[in-house]
Image: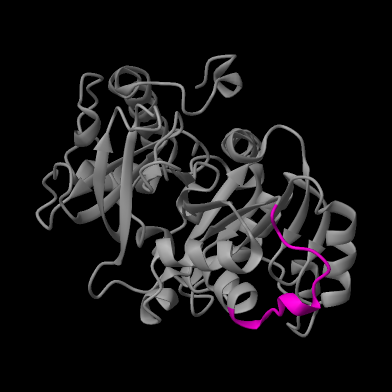
Amino acid sequence: MFENNFFKLNPFSFDNKYHFVSFKKSIYELTIHHYNNCNLYKKILKRMKFKKKNNTKLEELPMLPTRLFKNFDLLSVSKDKIIKTLVSSGTSSFNVSKIYLDELNSLNQVKALKNLIESIIGKERLPMIIVDKDPKLSDRKIFNAKTTAIYGFSYFGKNHFYLLDKNGNINYQGLNIFLEKFSNKKFFIFGFTSLIYQILLKKISTKRLNSNFYNGILLHGGGWKKLEKWKIKNKKFKNLLTKKFKLKKIYNYYGMVEQAGSIFLECEKCGGFKTSRYSDVIIRDKNFDILGNNKIGMIQLLSNIPTSYPGHNILTEDRGEIIKKGDCISGHKGKCFLVHGRLEKAELKGCSDVR
């Protein structure tokens, strides 16, 4: 599926010609792969009257609504090949997406995520603060979206420190030990947006800290639903963190369990989420027609990573708009887009409001 050096390339070193040719080719090949190996997917595509034509335009290839992953087991390999099952964080065990990974798919997720994260923290693993509880303290035996994200991102850190104890209280003693050891150089901070706001901005007392977070690199995602209620926008969120902790490098990310690995990182210049070699985005109106730049509609996400399940081309329940299509002021040649929350009447995405 991938060229030998594919994961050795800079994930953002491409132009739109890549998506017209190589990326489109990979999505078409994945469509055929899943058509041939997932009976349910084949039935769905037959109902869509899908025809195998390798000259089909990218935007014309069939997409699946993410809700289908909550209602059906969709996998393109035999069950004995599955090594891990990811689930979204729903309100009940009957309200979650189920994503089945074999060894190859799991490995490619790690490779893609590694390249994306290295673009902001560098190739060296950094000492890491996780603004959450250690998932090992939980009784859950499933990899839900929250646990998946914590374990996924913690892979790129070292000397991990979980800010919250088993009771959800701030461990000031452990935090000060961490800062004393590592705050004089770069270190990595990860957390869900709502917890970053509730814990770092609202609860933690800087008077009880022996250092600031000046050298920290913060990555956060999800949780914007709550912040919207409190009228906290991304710019204000960053300003508050900079003012309180002297943090300068703050990155928002967008992603979902249906396409774990190929997340979208925030562009430092334009503020949108940027596509990579592993991803693309299309915005559609209520009639599923494609919208141009600066038009808000439904977000369709494409990824060339999913091989063990047909999650390569999905229609989300989120609203967004493309703000740049090539030639961003950052030098990025792909698309940059904004996310404007959930579609009306769409079920709330549990991993957006993790606690």
State how many labels appear.
0
Among the 4 quarters of the image, the one containing residue 185: top right
Residue 232 at x, y percent in the picture: 41, 73
Q: Residue at x 49, y 45 (%)?
A: 263
- Residue that sits furthest to the top in the current view: 4
Name the residue nearer the viewer: 13 or 134: 13
Residue 208 forms part of the magenta stretch: yes
| Residue 47 shown left or right of residue 69 in the figure | left
Quarter of the image that includes the C terminus: bottom right
- On the rendered structure, is 180 left or right of 300? right
Q: Residue at x 53, y 15 (%)?
A: 3
The answer to which quarter of the image holds residue 121 is top right
Above-or-below relation of 106 to 154: above
Q: Position of residue 12 (x, y in %)?
A: 46, 28
* Colour scheme of the picture: one colour
- Residue at the image point whose x is 49% and y is 79% from the top: 91
Image coordinates for residue 96, horizontal then vertical, percent: 48, 68
Q: Work out whether residue 315 can be spotted.
A: no
Q: Is residue 218 above or below residue 21?
A: below
Q: Residue at x 33, y 57 (%)?
A: 339
Q: Magenta span has 5?
A: no
Name the quadrant containing residue 318: bottom left
| Residue 129 seen in the figure | yes
Which residues lie in the magenta part?
A: 202-214
Observer-nearest residue: 214 or 56? 214
Which SS type dominates the magenta stretch? Answer: loop
In the drawing, does residue 152 fall left or right of residue 256? right
Q: Residue 20 location in percent, x, y?
A: 28, 21
